[in-house]
Image (spheres, grey):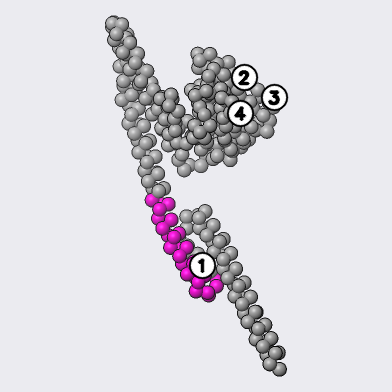
Amino acid sequence: MFPWILSAVLLFVIVILSFKIYTIWKSMDEICLSFREHLAEDTNTLITVSSGDRHVRRLAADINEELRILRRQRRKFMQGDQELKEAVTNISHDLRTPLTAISGYLELLEKEEKSETVTRYLAFIENRTEALKSLTEELFRYTVASSSEKMKLEAVDIRTVLEECLLNFYGEMERKGITPEIHMTDHAVIRQLNASALSRIFGNILQNALKYSDGDLSVTLKGSGEILFSNTASCLDQVQTGKLFNRFFTVENARNSTGLGLSIAKMLVEEMGGKISAAYGENRLSILIRF
């Protein structure tokens, strides 16, 4: 009789423990799912669990406290980031007016009689002024590109936009002695993109190629939507290539750049659902875009 009672008690304990383990597993799944949702969304709701186990509830309470801290830090960061973007935009606007005035006075001085030394100094001033105007515009474009406004997507022919960008840079390539090798599919490559953003992406990459190229440039567009820009760049290495998309990163000899061009390109590519990467090998820099 006693063995049967003992067996029944053991069976009852096993059932209770199994149910306890099941409810704990279920609560862990609830916590994991709720935690992922809270990280993805900025919400004030807290993690709740169906289990009455005090250890599980304590874990949920600790996670909720960390989520509150994370939420406060996230909002502080977003507010600071927005304030920084607005400040950069305002500074860019404020700089445009005096720079435009300086350029105007320089044009007037060009018409006046002046010595060879003054002419040389004016050339230096004009060169630096144009560089400052370019940097100011680049900062302004970055703040616009990184704004939270959702860009409008429509059917765009990548081939047409790329051809137009290459034509726009033809004069500058010619001045630098670069004859690009262009390989494009014969068919239109239609994707849901923003034509203006796509043009800016190609423009920034071509400007980067003109800065670092040793005198060559290869552009390839495949029917699959892959665009490859490649050029010899002996001034770069693999470490620098890995930082090209970082904000404000510049190679030492690129003094006229803020280092925002490729950062803007990456931001716009990803916002339109594409991917962009850079690779370096055998003294060649390759930038690949996939849409």
- Label 3 vs 1, first from the N-terminus: 1
Mark 1 Cα within 10 Å, few/some/many (few <14, many 20+)?
some
The tag earlier along the polypeptide, 1 or 2, is 1
Viewer-nearest of labels 1 and 2? 2
The residue that label 2 is drawn on is: 181
User: Who is closer to the viewer here, 17 or 185?
Assistant: 17
Which of the image's four quarters has the N terminus?
bottom right
Q: Determine which quarter of the picture holds residue 222.
A: top right
Q: Please identify the residue farthest to the bottom as the structure is shown.
A: 1
Residue 186 position in % (x across, y down): 69, 24
Mark 3: secondary structure? loop
Q: For mark 3, does the 10 Å Cα neighbourhood hold few (<14), some (14 to 19), or many (20 or more) residues?
A: few
Q: Amino acid at mark 3?
A: Asp
Q: Secondary structure at mark 4?
A: strand
Kind of residue at disc 4 = Leu
Q: Is residue 53 magenta?
A: yes
Question: Range of the magenta residues?
Answer: 50-76
